[in-house]
Image (tube, grey):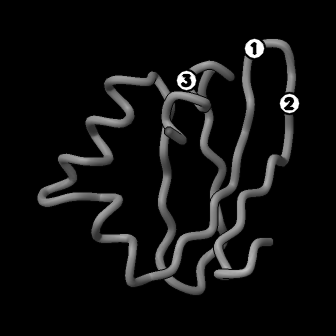
Amino acid sequence: MDSDNNSVHKSSVDADNVQLKVLVPSIAAGAIIGKGGEAITAVQTETGAKVKMSKSNDFYPGKLGAANAKRIALH
């Protein structure tokens, strides 16, 4: 975990897929999702990564996709 309380957890890796769990402050969720879901849809379309977001205080689902798609999505 870094100093500004954001964290990235790599929870599993295999030859084809990487699952990441990224904790994002609630205040930033809207920026990630975008108006009408446009931003999150663009990330998924352009990278092939699957992004799931949970509601506050819910479990934190994984994100599934090819390892290369993950690296692109994080940039």
Element under label 2? Answer: strand
Q: Is residue 53 above or below residue 5?
A: above
Tags 1 and 3 touching, CB below 8 Å: no
- Mark 3 vs 2, N-terminal side: 2
**Viewer-proximal residue, 64 or 22?**
22
Q: Is residue 44 above or below residue 16?
A: below
Element under label 3? Answer: helix
Residue 16's tag is 1
Dot 1: within a 10 Å radius of its alpha carbon, few (fewer than 14), some, or many (20 or more) residues? few
> Distance from label 1 to label 2 (Cα)?
8 Å
Please state which amino acid type lies under the numbered disc 2: Val
Q: Position of residue 17 (x, y in %)?
A: 73, 23
> Distance from label 1 to label 3 (Cα)?
11 Å
Q: Is residue 54 above or below residue 43?
A: below
> Distance from label 3 to label 2 (Cα)?
13 Å
Horizontal side of 1 relative to 66 (left or right) equals right
User: Of circles 3 and 2, which is in front?
Assistant: 3
Please state which amino acid type lies under the numbered disc 1: Asp
Please state which amino acid type lies under the numbered disc 3: Ala
Horizontal side of 53 relative to 27 (left or right) equals right
Q: Position of residue 72 (x, y in %)?
A: 51, 28
Residue 13's tag is 2
- Mark 1 vs 3, N-terminal side: 1
Q: How many marks?
A: 3
Element under label 1? Answer: loop
Dot 3: within a 10 Å radius of its alpha carbon, few (fewer than 14), some, or many (20 or more) residues? some
**Displayed quadrant of residue 2:** bottom right
**Displayed quadrant of residue 61:** bottom right
Q: Among all residues in the image, which is located at the extreme top?
A: 15
Residue 69's tag is 3
Q: Position of residue 42 (x, y in %)?
A: 27, 35
